[in-house]
Amino acid sequence: DVKVTQSSRYLVKRTGEKVFLECVQDMDHENMFWYRQDPGLGLRLIYFSYDVKMKEKGDIPEGYSVSREKKERFSLILESASTNQTSMYLCASLRGARRNEQFFGPGTRLTVL
Amino acid sequence: AQTVTQSQPEMSVQEAETVTLSCTYDTSESDYYLFWYKQPPSRQMILVIRQEAYKQQNATENRFSVNFQKAAKSFSLKISDSQLGDAAMYFCAYIGGANSKLTFGKGITLSVRP
C-alpha cells in the first residue's frame, strides 16, 4: 500500500513564524502536491512538483514556498505565517499519468495565532 | 478555466437506501478524467471511482456508480445500500487537457442515518 505521511496532525504557530510542513511518500512517486482545504472552498492547489528540485505554482502560491531535495519528501514552507494561513494542509502523491489516483496524507491542521 | 461545481453542501440518507451526489463541470477539452474522492472524518482522502471522458460506459465500483452525461457535463455519484461507513465528505474532481492539475469541487457532506 502507498503511504503518505505528514509530520504533524496539529500545529499551532504564531504570526510571523517560519513554518515547515513535511510530507513523505514511500512508493517512489514522481509527482507530489500540496493543497489547502477550507470549509466551503474545497481543496486548492498551492504547489506541486513533478521531479526532484522541480516545482510549479498552483492556484494559490502566494505566501508559500516548497522544497523537494529528495524524491520521497516534499516540504511546504510558510516564510512568515499569517492568520489567514490557518487551514488544513493536505499532501498528495501520484505515480505517472495524471489520470491516475492521487494518494493523500492525513493532513496537518495549522492554526496561526 | 475548468470549474467543478457541487451545489449541495450537505445530504442525508437512511442506512440501506440509495443516494445520489451531484457534480457538474465546465471544460472545453475533449480528453479529460473525472473522479470522486471520499474524506471520512479525521481520516485520509481516498479515491472512490474514476471515469474517463472517452468511455461511454459509466464506471462502477461495487456499491458506487456514476452517471456520466458528457453533453450535459454532469458527473453524479450513486451510492447504493448506504452504510454507516459511507458518512464522509465527498469531492468531485476533474483533470484534463495539457493541465496536470486536479480541480476539486467544494465538497458535499454526506450523513447516514441508522
Image (spheres, helix red, strand yellow):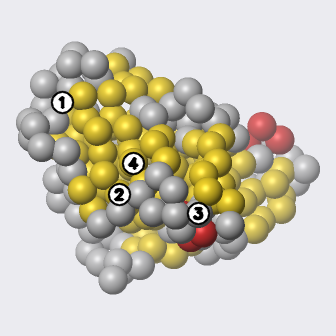
The residue at 87%/54% (across/down) is: A14
Up-down relation of residue A73 to residue B106 (above or below): below
Provide the residue designation for mark 1: B97
Q: Are marks 2 and 1 in contact (CB under 8 Å)?
A: no
Residue under mark 2: which chain is it in? B
Q: CA distance from mark 4 to mark 2?
A: 6 Å
Up-down relation of residue B101 to residue B69 (above or below): below
Q: Quadrant of the N terminus of chain B?
A: top left
Q: Are marks 4 and 3 in contact (CB under 8 Å)?
A: no
Residue under mark 1: which chain is it in? B
**Which of B79 and B95 lies nearest the eye of the viewer?**
B79
**Which of A107 and B89 lies nearest the eye of the viewer?**
B89
**Which of B68 and B99 lies nearest the eye of the viewer?**
B68
Q: Are marks 4 and 2 in contact (CB under 8 Å)?
A: yes
* Secondary structure found at label 1: loop
Q: Please give left or right for residue B101 compared with residue B105 in the image.
A: left
Residue under mark 4: which chain is it in? B
Q: Please give left or right for residue B19 compared with residue A68 in the image.
A: right
* Secondary structure found at label 3: loop
Inspect the image, locate mark 1, and give the three-letter code of the amino acid beneath it.
Answer: Gly
- From the top left corner, tell me how far across and down residue A7 is, in percent: 61, 74
Q: CA distance from mark 2 to mark 1?
A: 26 Å
